[in-house]
Amino acid sequence: MEFDMLNLIMKRRSIRKFKDEKLTGEQIQELVNAGLLAPTSKNNKAVELIVVDDIDTILKLKDCRNMGTIGLQTAPCAIVVIGDSEKSDVWVEDASIAASYIQLRAEDIGLGSVWIQMRNRVSESDSSENEIRKLLNIPEKYGVLCILAIGYKNENKEAYTENDVEESRVHFGKYR
Ligand SMILES: Cc1cc2nc3c(=O)[nH]c(=O)nc-3n(C[C@H](O)[C@H](O)[C@H](O)COP(=O)(O)O)c2cc1C
């Protein structure tokens, strides 16, 4: 069957419950490739990824933020998406595109994922970014955008349909 990009976009939903099954090295490589081939401003490749599949460390990552992290509770794989703020003044945009590409590739290979925001978020005692930098030994110059929790889906979410497209959010010619 012909590959249908819009169909893939409609099928991708945030998945926050995962099966107790590890990802293979090949699957992880597929995800990493999607992220590292995403476009970056001036092609300066400011985005880097930290793949974590050690469950204890994933649970410690969960504690780096005070809420919104339930997706990390059962995830067998977490990809921390970081950007070099010295290489790019738009590392947030670069890292966001990379994260989205990874999420789409995850759906494409039969996996579920959720974006867990870390930039501008806090733990009980510090910023989430500082907590993650400490935990994973990330140099100060890197911003930490988000953690993608990824694994085999253990919940069903309906795919979007064209009825979910909010036409009021698009303006033709000028804002009206
Ligand atoms: C920038 C951004 C930040 C998000 N932060 C979180 C988060 O911290 N925790 C979470 O469980 N989901 C988070 N999400 C997922 C959204 O809640 C989700 O995409 C939205 O509710 C729409 O649902 P869908 O992904 O199933 O279409 C985030 C998504 C984006 C794009």
Image: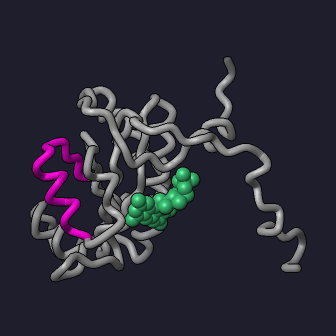
Residue 33 lies in the magenta-colored region: no
Residue at 19%, 65% in the rendered image: 63
* Residue 158 vertical placement versus 99 (above, below): above
**Residue 109 visible:** yes
What's the image's color scheme? one colour
Q: Position of residue 39 (x, y in %)?
A: 49, 54
Name the residue nearer the viewer: 85 or 69.
69
Locate residue 3: give its quadrant.
Answer: top right
Outermost residue on the front side: it is 155
Q: Is residue 86 left or right of residue 13?
A: left
Residue 60 lies in the magenta-colored region: yes
Q: Is residue 153 left or right of residue 62?
A: right
Residue at 40%, 77% in the rendered image: 89
Locate residue 60: give its quadrant.
Answer: bottom left
Q: Is residue 37 left or right of residue 48?
A: right
Name the residue nearer the viewer: 70 or 41.
70
Instruction: Say how many tags the image has.
Output: 0
Q: Quadrant of the C terminus?
A: bottom right
* Residue 115 vertical placement versus 2 (above, below): below
Residue at 42%, 34% in the rendered image: 111
Q: Position of residue 94 (x, y in %)?
A: 44, 63
Q: Position of residue 136 (x, y in %)?
A: 12, 60
* Residue stretch in magenta: 50-65
Q: Position of residue 85 (x, y in %)?
A: 31, 74
Name the residue nearer the viewer: 82 or 151.
151
**Residue 46 visible:** no
Q: Quadrant of the N terminus?
A: top right
Q: Is residue 156 left or right of residue 64?
A: right
* Residue 46 vertical placement versus 176 (above, below): above
